[in-house]
Image (cartoon, rainbow, N blue to C red):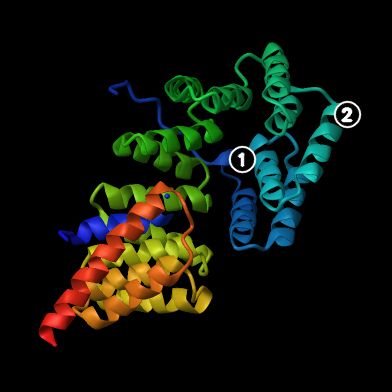
Amino acid sequence: MHRSRLDSLAVVLTLLAGCRSAPPPARGPLFGGDPQALETLARARADARQGRIDAALRDLRALRARLPGEFEVRRALQDVLVEAGRLAEARGEAEADLAREETPLTLTLVARLAPTPEDSRARLARALAIDPGFAPARHGEAMLLLAQGRRRRAEEALLEIVRDDPDALAARIDLARLLYDRGDLREARVHEEAVLRLDPGDLEARHNLAVTLFHLGDPKGADREFRRVLAVAPDDLEALFGLAAALLARGHGTRAAQVYERIAVLTPRDPRLSFSRGVLFQDYLDDPKRALEAYREYLSAPAAGGPWEWGLRLRVRLWTEDLERESGASG
């Protein structure tokens, strides 16, 4: 079956994730560039990404006490609670804040966790009645459009927000994702870089930029950004897989193999590891026997499900059959 190296590497990264006038660039870091606040937010996000939830919450709550009016601190705190399965706690905190004082900030935080779209819409409308330009509430309305399947309208709404407020971080993040999803990688890169100017410690944004650079044909840039993630979160699996793919694209098969050894220590039974090693051995280290072993291991693992994954398994099965025929012929 015909295959190419770049095609295989694109699969590895995928296993992980019109014409317009450009909006103004982001002006600079959050919190007026306060280094202590930026460092605390970055540390909390890195802890959360690596499962250290209590440490992340401790830092974020201290930062909230210090900067009570900063939406991005509150948003990060909510997100960590929700991702840790503590939605009721996050909701309770937001409702308590709203009960103490009704402001665009407190209304929007409650709207983010509202149980129904109607409730969320009502809270956002109230926030915008108080302050029609409040970017987080406008962002919330754009997300409601997206939830309704109105992707293009949501994208237009997000673009309007960042034109009006270049420092609207949450809108930049979701606009970049929408642009990436529909294949507008160059525009996605513009907004990913703007996010990092605002919040240099946002590891998810840096990871997304690395993936975008890879698909734009810049594996060296992707390598650099994945390493920046790993400098803060050395056990970040997605960044490790991405770094290995970038190394392979640069022709560094032996160095990629070392990264896969690190991944094997962290998650020895991850099907992505056996798939990636198959690509490594078949296309880069000229070791068809070990490639065959890796592909067989991948195929023996339970399927995650979904049409994309079934399509991948079919491709791996065909590659395996090719290797088996070649092995039989050489034997």
Image height check: is 79 above or below 235? above
Image height check: is 241 above or below 195? below
Q: Which residue is mark 2?
A: 100
Q: Nearer the viewer, residue 172 or 305?
A: 305
Write the residue at 86% across / 34% down. Answer: 96
Where residue 179 sits, quadrant-wise, is top left
Is 151 on the left-hand or right-hand side of 40? Answer: left
Q: Which residue is mark 1?
A: 31
Quadrant in the picture for the N terminus: bottom left
Three-letter code, disc 2: Arg
Regarding residue 88, the answer to whether it shows in the image is: yes
Regarding residue 14, the answer to whether it shows in the image is: no
Q: Residues within 10 Å of mark 1 (few under 14, many from 20)?
A: some
**Tag 1's secondary structure?**
helix
Is 299 on the left-hand or right-hand side of 8? Answer: right
Is 135 on the left-hand or right-hand side of 274? Answer: right
Mark toward the start of the polypeptide (2 vs 1)? 1
Which label is found at residue 223? none
